[in-house]
Image: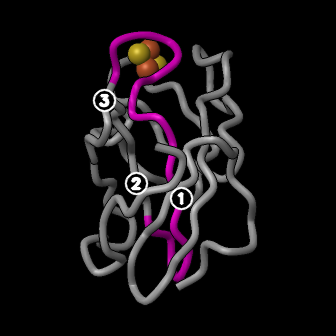
Amino acid sequence: MSRDVICQVDDLAPGEPLKIEIGGRELAVFRVADEVYVIDDQCTHGPGSLSEGELDGYVIECDFHQGGFDIRTGEAVIPPCMVPVRTYAVELVDGAVIVDFDQAAVACANKV
Ligand code: FES
């Protein structure tokens, strides 16, 4: 499984993270305006589920210890998070959100 449809753009409410489980992976999916981002749901700092966090702009704040990540790059931007979270390349085709599980996010093909 390298590419798969994980949901439809219409399933995503702007600013509200959605958790998707597919192929043994747990993903956190975000829509910001007309862009879609997908990262691992598991916080790299501990047991937090990032889809249960609070999205502020492009930063998802983990609800466990309030660390944060940039959902565009996976970079840990608020301590205590230090290790980046994995991002995935997203492509939007006819309203479907397609994730490439072998590639990190690229900021070009993810616009609605
Ligand atoms: Fe996410 Fe600690 S588990 S900040």
Residue 71 part of the magenta-drawn span: no
Q: How far across and how far down the image is residue 19, in percent?
A: 27, 46
Q: Is residue 40 above or below residue 58?
A: above
Mark 1 beta carbon near ligand 1 (under 8 Å): no
Secondary structure beneath disc 2?
A: strand
Using the numbered discs, state the Cα–Cα distance from disc 1 to disc 3 in whole angstroms.
Answer: 19 Å
Q: Which residues are magenta?
A: 31-48
Mark 1 vs mark 3: which is more N-terminal? Answer: 3
Name which residue type carries label 2.
Answer: Val
Cβ–Cβ below 8 Å for labels 1 and 3? no
Name which residue type carries label 3.
Answer: Gly
Circle 1 residues within 10 Å: few <14, some 14–19, many ≥20: many
Using the numbered discs, state the Cα–Cα distance from disc 3 to disc 2 in whole angstroms.
Answer: 16 Å
Q: Is residue 23 left or right of residue 105?
A: left
Q: How far across and how far down the image is residue 85, in percent?
A: 59, 29
Q: Is residue 37 left or right of residue 76?
A: left
Secondary structure beneath disc 1?
A: strand
- The residue tagged 2 is 29
User: Residue 37: which numbered mark, if any?
Assistant: 1
Q: Residue furthest top?
A: 46
Mark 3 or mark 2, whichever is nearer to me: 3
Cβ–Cβ below 8 Å for labels 3 and 2? no
- The residue tagged 3 is 24
Cβ–Cβ below 8 Å for labels 1 and 2? yes
Task: Judge by depth and name the residue closer to the eye, 28 or 96.
Answer: 96
Q: Quadrant of residue 77?
A: top right
